[in-house]
């Protein structure tokens, strides 16, 4: 678990009917650690009995130590984190925030950066753009959103001929084939948004002969709800119930079982846990384990993955 | 003679997976000496790789030129040396687009120098296909004077730039595309181990 700071909410601004911007500052105005474009923080939300921890990309200037800003999309069908942010958090609220971590940094070896965002997936690119401006590196940004209500980035993006916006409600669609054709050598592609967009970009890039090393993606995954299940801890013999709207990691935390974690979105690998026995099927929802590792069912990422079957025993 | 398999060494010692045809795509192929045979094997597996390929060959005394020329690449260029070929390689790589396939076959000196150029242009390492054929002579950089001696086949060897007696190391610089060589008798001047042929 990353080091945390208690920060104060100083601004709450609706960007669209669906998306709100929050600014956090140190209560004594102390400088915060600066970060790099694409970094995220984990925000703790004491929501009744449950302690929620959601990761949000930082959208403010990476070199600005005076505060951190995030943009949160209200997910009506989500597990409640974004609803908590929209309904409970006001200026003056103090919240526990992790120091920034970056799993979606710009590749410093690239000669040009092509950024592709879908919906709320625009957020990491807002800090990338500040860094690219500072580095004076060539880039283009392609931003697709379903509607203007969802397109929170419109308010925060600078006017630039290198920024292309496609609103699908208005009949505009992203042409991935065109974006990925005739890009100069040394171009890297970064994609963030819904799974469908990420796989469409990665598939199109493979068809156009792009090397994997030039492709970077970040999925905004939150743990999917599912059927309740029970896990057993091999070392202590304890059994822990995981409810429908809880992740396995959250259930372990609620039971005071210490697990290392960072991104809570199945990308960083920190919470990887050994499976001592598995009679049933692990629902792997992470981006960390390989296809072979998934099939073996000897490891699980508790931040994202669930289980159905007779018995799951963790090596804890 | 197939792709050379080098004995296990430290992590930085490059290994070469061998060329795998990527179909009819814009391609740059560069081979020297026996590397020609790897290109012929590649074309035999899928002749379509030549449809949009620029093939550059540096014979270094080998006799494969006419066979390579007849393969039917979109462009065939024979150059007297790697130095002479670099201007063309620079131009082709510099104006290439993402999706262009890069195939290198032959000596570690050529593959190291061209892959270093490609990496400096921002191409990731996984975009560079390489197959080692022919001489196991290595490109060695003297860490003292920074000069590079090509096709080193003995250990120790004499730096062709500053004259120091150098120990052949497996430490490879991807940025420079060369192995590192260090003075073998710095602590005991004149006491030099027996010269041996290097092995794969």
Image: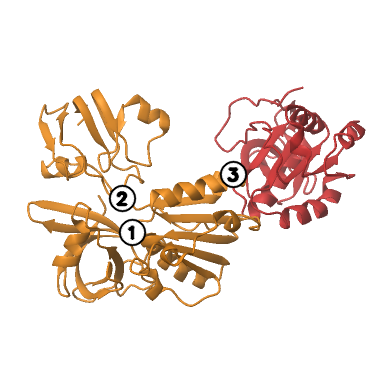
Q: Which residue is mark 2?
A: A263
Instruction: Say if mark 2 contacts mark 1, CB within 8 Å.
Output: yes
Instruction: Say if mark 3 contacts mark 1, CB within 8 Å.
Output: no
Q: Is residue B106 visible?
A: no
Circle 2 sits in a helix, a strand or a loop, which is it? loop
Q: Which chain is orange?
A: A
Q: Is residue A269 left or right of residue B54?
A: left
Q: Chain of mark 2?
A: A
Discs 3 and 1 lie in a common subunit: yes
Circle 3 sits in a helix, a strand or a loop, which is it? helix
The numbered mark, 3 or 1, whose residue comes first in the sequence reads 1
Q: Nearer the viewer, residue B179 or B89?
A: B89
Q: Residues within 10 Å of mark 1 (few under 14, many from 20)?
A: many
Mark 3–mark 1 distance (CA, rounded to whole Å): 31 Å
* Quadrant in the rendering for residue A212: top right
Q: Which residue is mark 1?
A: A40
Residue depth check, mark 3 versus mark 1: number of the one nearer the observer: 3
**Which residue corresponds to the image point at 30% horizontal and 66% vertical from the top-left?**
A70
Question: What's the colour of chain B in the image?
Answer: red
């Amino acid at each position: 678990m990353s080091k945390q700071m208690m920060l104060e909410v100083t601004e709450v601004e609706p960007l669209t009917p669906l998306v709100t911007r929050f600014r956090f500052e140190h209560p004594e105005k102390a400088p915060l650690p600066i970060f790099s474009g694409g970094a995220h923080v984990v925000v703790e939300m004491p929501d009744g009995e449950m302690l929620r921890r959601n990761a949000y990309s930082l959208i403010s200037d990476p070199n600005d130590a005076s505060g951190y800003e995030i943009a949160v999309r209200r997910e009506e069908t989500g597990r409640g984190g974004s609803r908590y942010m929209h309904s409970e958090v006001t200026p003056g609220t103090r919240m526990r925030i992790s120091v920034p971590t970056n799993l979606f940094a710009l590749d410093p070896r690239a000669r040009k950066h092509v950024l592709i965002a879908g919906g709320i997936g625009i957020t990491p690119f807002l800090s990338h753009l500040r860094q690219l401006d500072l580095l004076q590196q060539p880039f283009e940004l392609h931003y697709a959103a379903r509607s203007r209500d969802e397109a929170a980035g419109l308010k925060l993006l600078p006017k630039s001929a290198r920024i292309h916006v496609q609103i699908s409600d208005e009949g505009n669609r992203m042409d991935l084939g065109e974006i990925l054709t005739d890009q100069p050598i040394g171009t890297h592609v970064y994609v963030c948004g819904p799974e469908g967009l990420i796989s469409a970009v990665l598939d199109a890039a493979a068809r156009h002969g792009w090397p994997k090393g030039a492709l970077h993606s970040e999925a905004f995954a939150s743990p999917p709800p599912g059927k309740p299940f029970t896990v057993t801890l091999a070392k202590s013999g304890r059994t822990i119930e995981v409810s429908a709207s809880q992740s396995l990691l959250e259930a372990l935390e609620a039971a005071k079982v210490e697990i290392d974690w960072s991104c809570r979105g199945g990308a960083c690998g920190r919470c990887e846990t050994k499976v001592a026995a598995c009679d049933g099927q692990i629902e792997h929802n992470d981006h960390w384990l390989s296809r072979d590792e998934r099939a073996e069912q000897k490891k699980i990422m508790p931040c994202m993955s669930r289980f159905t079957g007779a018995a799951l025993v963790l090596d804890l | 003679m197939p792709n050379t398999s080098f004995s296990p060494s430290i992590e930085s010692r490059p290994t070469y997976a061998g060329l795998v045809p990527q179909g009819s795509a814009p391609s740059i192929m560069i081979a020297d000496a026996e590397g020609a045979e790897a290109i012929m094997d590649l074309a035999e597996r899928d002749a379509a790789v030549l449809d949009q390929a620029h093939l550059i060959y540096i014979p270094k005394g080998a006799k494969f030129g006419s066979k390579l020329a007849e393969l039917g690449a979109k462009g065939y260029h024979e150059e007297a040396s790697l130095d002479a070929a670099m201007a063309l390689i620079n131009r082709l790589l510099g104006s290439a687009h993402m999706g262009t396939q890069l195939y290198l076959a032959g000596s570690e000196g050529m593959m190291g120098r061209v892959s270093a150029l490609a990496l400096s242009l921002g191409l990731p390492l996984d975009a560079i296909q390489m197959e080692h054929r022919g001489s196991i002579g290595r490109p060695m950089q003297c860490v003292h004077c920074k000069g590079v001696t090509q096709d080193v086949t003995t250990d120790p060897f004499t730096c062709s730039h500053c004259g120091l007696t150098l120990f052949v190391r497996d430490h490879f610089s991807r940025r420079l595309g060369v192995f590192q060589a260090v003075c073998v008798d710095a602590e005991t001047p004149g006491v030099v181990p027996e010269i041996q042929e290097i092995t794969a």
